[in-house]
Structure formats: C-alpha cells, structure tokens
Amino acid sequence: MKRVKSTSKTILEFSLIFIFLCVGCIQKEITTPLETNPDFEPAYLKLHRTGELKKRGEELWNMMKSCKLCPRTCGANRLKGEKGFCGATSQLVISSYHPHFGEERPLVGKGGSGAIFFTHCGLKCVFCINWEISQGGAGKQTSIEDLADMMLNLQKLGCHNINLVTPTHYSAHIILAVDIAAGKGLRPPLVYNTCGWERLEILKMLDGIVDIYLPDFKYSDANMAAKYSSGSTGYPEITKEALLEMHRQVGVAKPAKDGLIYKGLMIRHLVMPNNVSGTKEVIKWIAENLPKDTYLNIMSQYRPMYKAFEYPEISRRITRQEYEEAVRDAKELGLTNLDIQGD
Ligand code: SF4
C-alpha cells in the first residue's frame, strides 16, 4: 500500500510540473500574433475588453432555464439537469478537437482549421454522417475552462481559426470559454459551423463575436426538412432569415493576402439525390437575396448513412449529372464565388 501511495505521489508531482510547463509554453506561444496576418484582430476581442462578452455568455446561460437556444424552443430546464430535444443538459460534452484539413481551402491553409466537435444536435437528420456524436451522445464531459484551453491549444498548434462544429445548443458555454481564452491571448477568428437553423434572437447575441459564419442551407422545401430532419418544418424560412442576419453581421467572405478567410459568410449546400435538398430553389434564393459574390460551397459528398437506407430516395450517392446541374444553375443565376468540387 505504502509503495503504491509513494509512486502515485511521484506521478502526481511529475504531472503537476508537466502541466505547469505546458501552461507556461501556451502562455508564451499565444501572445504571438497570427503568423500570416499579424494585423488581424478577431471580433470577440473588443467585447472581451469591455466585459460584454461575459455578459452575453451569462445571458445565453440563463436561457437554458427554459431552453430556447435553437428553433426547437423545447423549454427543457437544462440548468436543473433536464435533457432537451437535442440531448444536451447544461453539462458540456465534446467529442474531439484537432486541426482539420478537410474543410474549405481558405479555412485550412497550411495549419488546418481548429475544429472542436460538440456532442448532440437539435436538428437530428436521418442521414447524419456524424450520428454517433450528434444523436448517439458520443463524447466526453468537459468544463468551460477546458474548452478555453482547447481553443488555446489549437492556436498553439498553428490552426488558422477556431471552428465550432454544431455549436448551437452550447452557445452559452462557448461564449464563456472564448471570454476566458481571449484573456489568455486567443487570437484566431471564430468559425460558427452550423446547420443553418438558428434563431434570430440568438444570432443577434452573437453579433460582434463570430468572425465567420459557416452555415448549411440544407432544404428549400419544408416537407423535406420535416421528413428527414425530425419535423423541422420551419427549416427553410428560419434558415433564410438566419442567413440574412449572418450576412448583415459579417458580410461577404473574401480571402486576405495570405489566401485565408478571416471574416464573412460561407454557405454550404449538400446536393442530395432525387432533388431532396431542392438545390435549384436554394441557389435561386441565395442569388436573389444575397450579393452575387456570396461564398457558396456546392457539396457533392452525400452518401447514405445512419437511417438513410430506410428511405429509398436518399439511399444512394448523387450522380454526376445531378451535381453538374447544380453547378450550372449556380452559374446561370450569376453566382460568382463558388466552391466547386473537382475544380
Ligand atoms: S438547444 Fe436543445 S434544449 Fe435548447 S431548445 Fe434546442 S433542442 Fe431544446
């Protein structure tokens, strides 16, 4: 027993020294400006300095008493441990975090996009590629302080941005973590990587915090949204409103001198088989309601996953013809800032 105790003590002391050295190392690194764009200052810094960032985080936190953080507005008392429709309580759960090299090129650069994958999701699509995380609850309970450290670690690893994947139900935790991390030298832009289905009221609270919005525009047809995303009939209309607000806040996404994007709206549209996603209508709406140089990634990578095989119309990949038609429509409708697969 004694020997075990003494070994544990040595390990504990060694771990504390190691943690101390690591923290020292982070502190040293993170005060360095972004390597390829030293003049860049992320939006959240100003609000951090005035104390507004923390205040907004706390306001969002209080909204979890009868949760209205996403358009489900399911009213769960997450602060008392109740699970919402999304599966989340007030306990933060994160699946993983690491430099991600599979995102859009202007987000990846050489150092990668610093992705943090949040567990749970309020949309619950039957074809979700990350269903173990979004609907299966895979992930680890994490504190807000640890989330702040993850952001700082991603910066230290040379990531060009902090990419918050499926952030909506944890917006309070995220803002509070950004506030802590900003105080310790966080500098990369924040990417709000969302399914696009966001409440206007919440987006307004993110004004001046998020640098890059990276929303999906999944469906143009309410019936399709309801069928494949757990009854979310309002998806098309809510997402349109959300996109207009995101554009109002951050404008068109344009690369800086180093080729990376630091600010702006970057929309993703996943082309689905048999026109389930209503691609032409999605593109038409963007062309008619946002500037023609709005960044649009037309995604071809749909593959049937999770429960997709229960729906014959989405149980295959898309054809080359379906993808080419989407690209042709986008060009004919005058969109000029297209991210096209295979280009
Ligand atoms: S974020 Fe979750 S708990 Fe909150 S309203 Fe949406 S589904 Fe309900």
Image: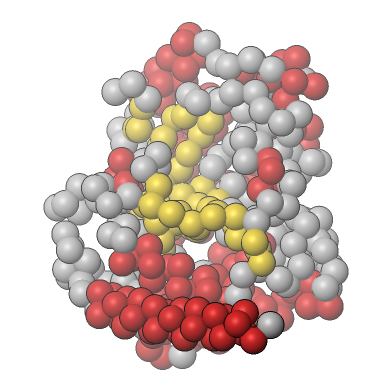
Q: Is 155 positioned to the left or the right of 181 in the image?
A: left
In the rendered structure, the answer to whether residue 6 lies left or right of residue 252 reads right
Q: In this view, does 248 lie to the left or right of 216?
A: left
Residue at point 81% right, 41% down?
231
Rendered-image quadrant of the N terminus: bottom right
Whether residue 325 is visible here, answered yes or no, is no
Quarter holding residue 62: bottom right
Which quadrant of the figure has residue 236? top right
In the rendered view, would you say 33 is above or below 193? below
Residue at image point 39% right, 84% down: 17
- Count of number-bearing discs: 0
Q: Residue 295, how many percent across, how many down?
A: 36, 41
Residue furthest to the bottom in view is 50
Q: Where is residue 164 in the image (x, y as percent from the top left)?
A: 50, 58
User: Residue 249 placed where, x, y %?
Assistant: 43, 63
Name the residue nearer the viewer: 159 or 11: 11
Query: Residue at the location (16% across, 68% down)?
Result: 38
Quarter holding the C terminus is top left
Please say which color scheme the image uses. Answer: secondary structure
Q: Can residue 48 be seen in this view?
A: yes
Q: Is residue 86 above or below residue 291?
A: below
* Nearer to me, 25 or 177: 25
Direction from residue 83 to residue 117 in the image, left or right: left
- Residue at 60% over, 60% down: 94
Name which quarter of the figure residue 77 lies in: bottom right
